[in-house]
Image (tube, rainbow, N blue to C red):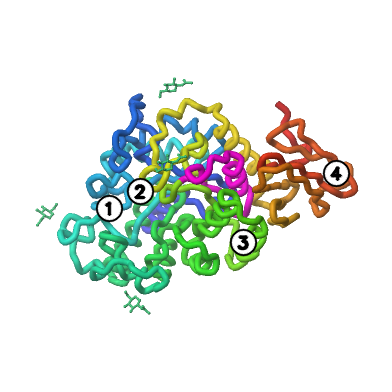
Amino acid sequence: MWNLLLLLATFFSSTNAATKDQWRSRTIYQLLTDRFSRGNGDNSPCPDLGNYCGGTFNGITQNLDYIQNMGFDAIWISPIPVNYPGAYHGYAAIDLYGVNPNFGTEQDLLNLVNACHSRGMYVMLDVVANHVGPVTPNYTQINPFNNEKYYHPYCEISNWNNQTNVEYCWLGTLPDLAQENPFVRQTLKNWIHWIVNKYGFDGLRVDTAIEVPMDFWAEFSMSSGVYTVGETFNGDPNYCATYQGCLDGILNYPLFFMMRSVFQQGQPMWDCRTFMQSCSVFPDQTILGSFVDNHDNPRFLNGTSNLNAFKSALAWSVTTLGIPIIYYGDEQGFSGGPDPYCREVIWPYLNQTTSEMYTFVTQIVNYRKQMQLWNYPWIERYAQSNFYCFSRGLATMAFTNSPNNVQYSVTYNPYTNGQVVCNIFWQNDCVTITNGALNVVLLNGEVKLYMPKSMMVSE
Ligand SMILES: *[C@@H]1O[C@H](CO)[C@@H](O)[C@H](O)[C@H]1NC(C)=O
Ligand SMILES: *[C@@H]1O[C@H](CO)[C@@H](O)[C@H](O)[C@H]1NC(C)=O
Ligand SMILES: *[C@@H]1O[C@H](CO)[C@@H](O)[C@H](O)[C@H]1NC(C)=O
Ligand SMILES: *[C@@H]1O[C@H](CO)[C@@H](O)[C@H](O)[C@H]1NC(C)=O
């Protein structure tokens, strides 16, 4: 009897845990806790982006309106364990069970998760099970992996094409956990179950997924009980697809590279077709994470000042198959270079909710939601060297990477003759389907997202 009650109690205490099916409709805002808000009104600049800047859990809690008002219904926060001195990003743990005191207390973190849940927002935690902080040779500092025997012998990853090398060697100076050691394996599985349930996290972003064997991830993911999306930093869909199964989804780096090549470098848009065809190897594209920017790469706008190209890439990432992830600062047009310059502080901008990019992000996120794009298959409608068009349900997205006036007559479309469809970015930009065709005109590299006029929400 008591066992049954205990079982029921465990079940109900973890009902926040969200599955991949519940994540499919979500749109995620990725932030680094250290860079979002200090939570004390201090908006002075950060003297050194390579060290702590002062962001806190309370700062995020106080500024959830800023995120939710764009339409986001999930946040991804950076890792929370106690970290090596100066590791503001959280990817160099010292104590897996403690909370990084720079960000606040356990209670502050619980308050953040509860505040998100009461708004109907999910919280995704970034977790690291591949390595710990660079403490060599003094492993006694690590809780709980306090002995050299829990790690692979030192060798630095030197050949990313040799999977054994990638899995058994170290990422730089970070001690590489030996998941084949029974204590390490069981402890990591217990830890992930514990941390998800203690704080009520709804999903996990799994760091350095390709550096750990898949059989471990399958057990780890199962033990977590929530949706998991893995960082597979690799542009080859064939390689990345092998990780979908042991983890629910992967961060779609192949898409990231395609968008940079087409919209930033101006490669022919035939590449979009080739790319989408190559993605058929994924077991389920609807639960991959699609993103334009993140904390590990120079921002899109660092490589070009073309705002329309950036908007096109963002619109693609939000409307294509997958769960969109927008990196904090994209909504303010940030343009930082490589790590740590792409990890700007955003606090001076948290009152700027009418900026051009904030408005644009709000529009595309709400379009995805209103048209419930996740419910519809992805259909290519038109491909050319300077034009690409796809649809999902009655939503049609038209893209170009040309600065010129681009016109195409899209005869293969989801509409009926005489139907009026409008571009969400300009209420008066409506066209009537004539002779079966949707006539698209794009200027200056702009993107257009269409919906039937009858569905437009009037202002
Ligand atoms: C190793 O780390 C522990 C815990 O931080 C510390 O007490 C000890 O002095 C360190 N030993 C060496 C040799 O640095
Ligand atoms: C791959 O890496 C492992 C571990 O570093 C090494 O022992 C092995 O020789 C490498 N294999 C090849 C073909 O280079
Ligand atoms: C791109 O990044 C570099 C290095 O951080 C920086 O110096 C430069 O100003 C950035 N460019 C833009 C357009 O922001
Ligand atoms: C936003 O806050 C900054 C300080 O962080 C201030 O300088 C600026 O005037 C504020 N802008 C608005 C529109 O309130």
Secondary structure of residue under mark 4? loop
> Mark 2 and 1 residues: CB-CB less than 8 Å, in contact?
yes
- Location of mark 2 (residue): 79
- Location of mark 3 (residue): 275
**CA distance for labels 2 and 4:** 50 Å
Mark 2 residue CB less than 8 A from any atom of ligand 1:
no
- Location of mark 1 (residue): 93
Query: Where residue 113 sits: x, y (%)?
Result: 41, 40
Left/right placement of residue 341 relative to residue 241 reads left
Which numbered disc, 2 or 4, marks the residue closer to the eye?
Answer: 4
Q: Residue at x 19, y 66 (%)?
A: 148
Going from the N terminus, do you reach mark 2 or mark 1 first?
2
Going from the N terminus, do you reach mark 2 or mark 4 first?
2
Asked if residue 194 shows in the view, the reply is yes
Left/right placement of residue 32 relative to residue 405 reads left
**CA distance for labels 4 and 1:** 58 Å
Left/right placement of residue 258 relative to residue 88 reads right
Left/right placement of residue 200 relative to residue 414 reads left
In the rendered image, residue 412 lying in the magenta stretch gets the answer no
